[in-house]
């Protein structure tokens, strides 16, 4: 006698979670079905029998996998680069947009290296062909800012390069003023892509840079205390914001000040995107990761809905990422983050030591990339050139000892084992 078994429709079903998907237009209790790495269906009380695996996420917040618009993930090849995978699996970030680590000279090697990551890595191409091999200075030699070479590189990597990056401060442009930005805009215009502009210590000033930008171009480090200078709020920023220039947080190790963000919020200018600028010098603080940066936005007065939008559909739209990235709409990649929402008073600090308190924080419980949970990964040691405080070094040693203790103890005791190969087989 044979028994017919109805084939399963889905590979995975997440049930009972509280969905927050600004891009897909869904909130509240929903189940999410996954097949072949994509969202197959979203609905209430989807049939469990139709799934090969069912995961109960009741009492948890479920969002699309986060999109971090500004990171540096050319690990081992630049001053700033980190490996994203050891952070991704516990932070909910499935799309890591590299912000100009590579220019035209090294982009082929960058593309090969990042193809090996578990996460998705679109990239901003640095207008300087040498990229970010050193802490500063990539555009001091103007010949490095080769427009034709940048355009050719973009066309060689369609869909991977999503924009042109340029760092515009006195440490990086030297005596060349706004010329590197002009060349970045020229290359971007030829390719139909946006420009991301890093702002910092003048000259050139923010007021000199903003008129050169087009609607859809991005200012990163938009709440930088260094770029704001002694006056704080620059009227030119409002004009650019109203003209359609997008503002990105880009926290980093020197690019975010609570008081500057609060002035922008008071002026009705919330950031369009929230990113970490996670790199070798911000990974161990003050940025740490995207959930921590999101909590800082909550501490400044943004709502949870605003912050999730600014870390999912907001950056996806800003970059023209297709295929449903940043949403959980049917057909989109099954990049999913599951969170415990903790309420309380969580003290946070910006890059200048200003402190604020957030009423909640998101603690990642699971991160899925294309419908599969990202595996746990241990982080690499900090590079020797990264300045760390004594407290940071002690914390890293303590973390290493704690992990070692977990891994050197037997996983389970005698009662947690079964006889795999019986002595008297049967």
Image: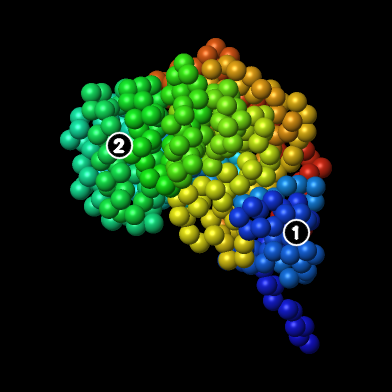
Instruction: Work out whether 34 lies above or below 136.
Output: below
Q: Name the spot of residue 28 as percent of width and height, x first.
A: 76, 54
Could you say which quadrant of the image residue 49 lies in?
bottom right
Q: Is residue 379 left or right of residue 179?
A: right
**Label 1 – label 2 distance at C-alpha:** 45 Å
Q: Residue at x 30, y 37 (%)?
A: 181
Closer to us: 136 or 205: 205
Could you say which quadrant of the image residue 9 lies in?
bottom right
Instruction: Work out whether 392 lies above or below 107.
Output: above
Q: Name the spot of residue 202 as percent of width and height, x first.
A: 35, 22
Choose mark 1 or mark 2, whichever is in front: 2
The disc, 1 or 2, on the residue closer to the chain's N-terminal end is 1
Q: Quadrant of the N terminus?
A: bottom right
Q: How many marks?
A: 2
Q: Residue at x 66, y 53 (%)?
A: 21
Q: Name the spot of residue 76 as percent of width and height, x first.
A: 38, 34
Q: Is residue 280 left or right of residue 267?
A: left
Closer to us: 356 or 422: 356
Instruction: Work out whether 292 lies above or below 340.
Output: above
Q: Quadrant of the C terminus?
A: bottom right
Residue that carries the numbered disc 1 in the rendered image: 30
Could one spot residue 165 in this view of the protein? no
Residue that carries the numbered disc 2 in the rendered image: 181
Could you say which quadrant of the image residue 355 lies in?
top right
Q: Residue at x 43, y 47 (%)?
A: 216
Q: Secondary structure at mark 2?
A: helix
Q: Secondary structure at mark 1?
A: strand
Instruction: Work out whether 147 lies above or below 223.
Output: below
């Amino acid at each position: 006698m044979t028994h017919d078994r109805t084939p399963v429709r889905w590979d995975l079903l997440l049930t009972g979670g509280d969905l927050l998907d600004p891009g897909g237009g869904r909130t509240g209790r929903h189940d999410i079905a996954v097949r072949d790495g994509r969202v197959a269906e979203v609905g209430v009380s989807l049939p469990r029998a139709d799934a090969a695996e069912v995961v109960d996420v009741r009492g948890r917040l479920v969002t699309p996998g986060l999109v971090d618009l500004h990171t540096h993930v050319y690990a081992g090849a630049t001053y700033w680069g980190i490996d994203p995978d050891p952070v991704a699996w516990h932070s909910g970030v499935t799309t890591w947009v590299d912000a100009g680590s590579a220019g035209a000279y090294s982009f082929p090697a960058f593309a090969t290296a990042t193809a090996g990551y578990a996460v998705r890595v679109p990239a901003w191409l640095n207008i300087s062909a040498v990229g970010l091999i050193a802490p500063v200075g990539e555009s001091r030699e103007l010949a490095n800012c080769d427009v034709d070479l940048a355009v050719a590189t973009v066309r060689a990597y369609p869909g991977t390069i999503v924009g042109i990056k340029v760092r515009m401060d006195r440490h990086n442009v030297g005596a060349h003023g706004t010329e590197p930005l002009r060349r970045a805009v020229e290359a971007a215009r030829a390719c139909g892509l946006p420009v991301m502009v890093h702002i910092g210590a003048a000259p050139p000033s923010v007021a000199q840079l903003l008129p050169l930008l087009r609607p859809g171009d991005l200012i990163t480090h938009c709440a930088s205390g260094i770029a704001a200078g002694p006056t704080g709020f620059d009227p030119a920023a409002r004009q650019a914001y109203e003209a359609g220039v997008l503002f990105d947080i880009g926290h980093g190790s020197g690019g975010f000040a609570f008081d500057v963000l609060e002035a922008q919020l008071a002026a009705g200018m919330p950031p369009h995107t929230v990113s970490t600028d996670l790199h070798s010098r911000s990974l161990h603080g003050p940025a740490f990761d995207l959930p921590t940066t999101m909590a800082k936005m909550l501490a400044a007065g943004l709502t949870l809905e605003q912050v999730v939008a600014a870390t999912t559909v907001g950056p996806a739209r800003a970059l023209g990422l297709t295929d449903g990235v940043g949403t959980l709409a049917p057909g989109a990649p099954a990049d999913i983050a599951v969170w415990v929402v903790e309420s309380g008073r969580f003290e946070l600090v910006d890059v200048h030591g200003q402190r604020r308190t957030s009423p909640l924080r998101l603690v990642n419980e699971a991160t899925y990339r294309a419908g599969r949970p990202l595996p746990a990964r241990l982080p690499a040691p900090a590079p020797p050139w990264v300045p760390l405080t004594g407290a940071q070094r002690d914390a890293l040693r303590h973390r290493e000892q704690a992990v070692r203790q977990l891994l050197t103890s037997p996983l389970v005791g005698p009662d947690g084992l079964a006889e795999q190969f019986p002595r008297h087989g049967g």
